[in-house]
Image: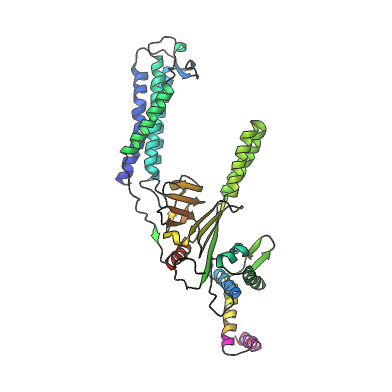
Amino acid sequence: MLIRVDPTRATPLADQIAACVRRGIADGSVRGGERLPGARDLAASLQVSIHTVLAGYQSLRDEGLIELRRGRGAIVRDGVPAGRAAVVELARDLVRAARRFDLDDEEVVALVRAAARTS
Amino acid sequence: MSSATTRRTLLAGIPHLIAFAPAIVVLATADGLPDPIASHFDLSGSADRYAGRATVLAVTVALAVGLALLFGLCARQSGAGSPPGTRWDNGRVLVAASWATAGLLGAILVGSVAANLGLTDPAAAVLPWWTFPAGLATGAVAGVVAWLVTPSIPANGEEPEAVPAVPLGPAEQFSWSRTVGSPWIPAVGAVMAIIGCALGVTVHPAAGIITGVAGVAVVLNSQAWVTVDRRGLTITLGLLGWPRLHVPADDVASVTVADISPTGFGGWGYRIVPGGRGIILRAGPALVVTRRSGQQLTVTVDDPRTAAGVLAGVASSGGRSC
C-alpha cells in the first residue's frame, strides 16, 4: 500500500495518512486481515513523528476500519466492505467542503439528516 | 521450441549415450569377461559385489538412456538465455553439469568393466586406485569443455518491463510497503526442525543441531517486508529483521518489473547469483532494481508496478528531500 503525505498541505499529516489507508481499502489494494506497517517503521519511512502515525491509525480504528492491538500492530478488519471506507472518505470530503463555505459542523449534520430523510 | 533450445536439449542429452557407449560395447561383445562380473568395489579396490553380465549390461543401457532423457528434458525446460534479474544462464550450466556427470560416470564404468577383463574369477578383479580421481578429472574437463562449446544466448524475449515514474512533489513524503511470504516455506522449515530433533536423538546430536538450526533459519526467513520511500528500497527478511538489504535512492540506475521463476535463481529464499541477488519467496511478479554498479536486486512482491513507479520517481528526484 502506498501512503503519501505532503507537509505543505493544510490537512494534518495524521489525516493524510488515514486518508491513504481509507483509499487503499476503498479501491481494494488493501484487504481485510492485512497488516498495516508498524507505527515506528512507517514514521521512520515517512520522516514524521510516531505520534502522527498513531493518531492516523486511531482515527481509522474509531471509524471501524482497522483493529489496533498491543504487540500485534494495526490490522485491517476482516469483512470491512471496501464501500465503507469509501463512504468514510466521502464524509470527510463533505466536511472539508462545508468548512470551506463556513458551514459549521451542526449544519453539516443537519444537511446529512435532511438528505437521509428525503432520499 | 526454438532451435537454440533444441540444440541445448541435444547437447545435454547425447553425452551420456557417448560416455556409456564404451562400457556397453565391451559388456556386449568382449570375450574375456567372467559371468557374473564384479559390479561393485570397496574402498581398497577389491570386488565386493557381483552381478550377471546381462543384468549389468541392461542396467548400464537403462542408466545411459535415463540420464540422457533426464538432462535433455531439464535443458529443454530451463529454456535458453538468462531470466530477468540474473546473468545465470541455466541452460548452459545444465549442459556443463550434464557433460561433467557423463564424464565421471562413463570413466568409472569403463574402469570397472575393464577391471574384469581377462579374468575367469570375478573375485580377483581389482579396481585401480586412480579410477575415481581419473573419473573426477574426466568429468571436470568435460564440464569445462561443455561450458566453452555451449553458445551463450542473450536474455530471451521476456524483456523486463520499464515502468513510468510516479510524479512526486518536492516536499512530499511517501511509503510503499508490502509483505511477501509463502505459506509452505515455513512448513518446510518446521519439518526440517522436527527432523533435526529426530536426528539429534537417533543419529548424532551435531546432525540434529545443524538440521534444526537450518529449519529455524528457513522459518525465520520465509517472509519479507518490502519498503520503498525517500531512503530508497529496503527489504527486511524474516521475523528478526535480519538480513536486511538496502538500495539507497541515489544508487538506483533503473527499475523494472518482471515475471520471475525460482528456477532462474536456483531456488527459493535469499539467492546470490551471478549479476545480482534475489529475495525469491514465490514465482510471479517481481521488482527488479538495477544499481549503478550494474548489479541487480530482485524481490518477488505483489503489485511491483506501484513500487517500481514510486522508486523510479524517487531516483529521478534525487532521493532524500530533507
Residue at position x 44%, y 14% from top? Answer: B126
Residue situated in front as seen by the camera: B86 or B121: B86
Quarter of the C terminus of chain A within the rendering: bottom right
Residue B264 in the image: state x and y as whole percent.
Answer: 43, 47
| Extreme-top residue of the structure | B120
- Residue stretch in magenta: A97-115
Query: What type of secondary structure mainly makes up the magenta span?
Result: helix
Residue situated in front as seen by the camera: B184 or B233: B233
Q: Is residue B8 left or right of residue B165?
A: left
Quarter of the N terminus of chain A within the rendering: bottom right
| Extreme-left residue of the structure | B3
| Extreme-right residue of the structure | A70
Residue B10 in the image: state x and y as whole percent.
Answer: 33, 37
Q: Colour scheme used in the picture?
A: rainbow
Where is A91 relative to B77, above or below? below
Asked if residue B9 can be seen in this view, the reply is yes
Asked if residue A38 can be seen in this view, the reply is no
Residue A81 in the image: state x and y as whole percent.
Answer: 60, 69
Where is B121 relative to B179, above or below? above
Where is B243 relative to B44, above or below? below
Count of labels shown?
0
Residue at position x 44%, y 56% from top? Answer: B288
Quadrant of the rendered structure where residue A66 is?
bottom right
**Magenta residue check for A109:** yes
Residue A22 in the image: state x and y as whole percent.
Answer: 58, 71
